[in-house]
Amino acid sequence: MDYSFAQRGPYFEIRAIGRLTKAEVLDFWDVMERQPGYAEARGMIVVLHALWWEMNKQEVEELATMGERFRPVRWAFITQEDLSFGLVEAFTSALRGPAMMRVFKDESEAVAWLSADP
């Protein structure tokens, strides 16, 4: 998986592309937590593009049991791909922990949700 990080106003933006395995996600989380701006961000924007998933729904749900790792802010996942949308939706619905997450196909809707009062 290739990824990049950026500050986007009060939000921390993550862009990911490529192969996605459970081990890569765990490694990615370690890197993400050390990025400047991550700890202070008011919300997270995660843009997924051209991913090929090399994990099944059970592995996605196992990752969701580790939700306490996530900062207790809103996380907006954005993807146009049906498979990615469905697997991220499975992740967010199985999530354990304080984070609030939703998946969107439209970036402007995602930013509006992040900006709204909880």
Image (tube, grey):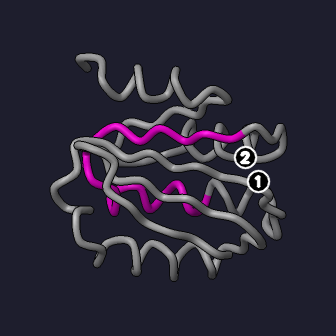
Residue bearing mark 1: 57
Spatial CA distance of label 1 from label 2 is 7 Å
For the image, the number of numbered tags is 2
Please give the range of residues in magenta: 62-79
Residue bearing mark 2: 87
Q: Position of residue 101 (x, y in %)?
A: 45, 37
In magenta stretch: residue 97: no
Question: Answer yes or no: do the residues labelled 1 and 2 have beta carbons within 8 Å?
Answer: yes
Quadrant of residue 43 within the rendered picture: top left
Image check: 46 left or right of 69? Answer: right
Residue at horizontal 22%, vertical 51%?
Answer: 41
Q: Position of residue 26 (x, y in %)?
A: 52, 76
In magenta stretch: residue 77: yes
Could you tell which of marks 1 and 2 lies nearer the N-terminus? 1
| Three-letter residue code for mark 2 | Leu
Q: Position of residue 46 (x, y in %)?
A: 51, 50
Q: Which mark is residue 117?
A: none
Image check: 111 left or right of 57? Answer: left
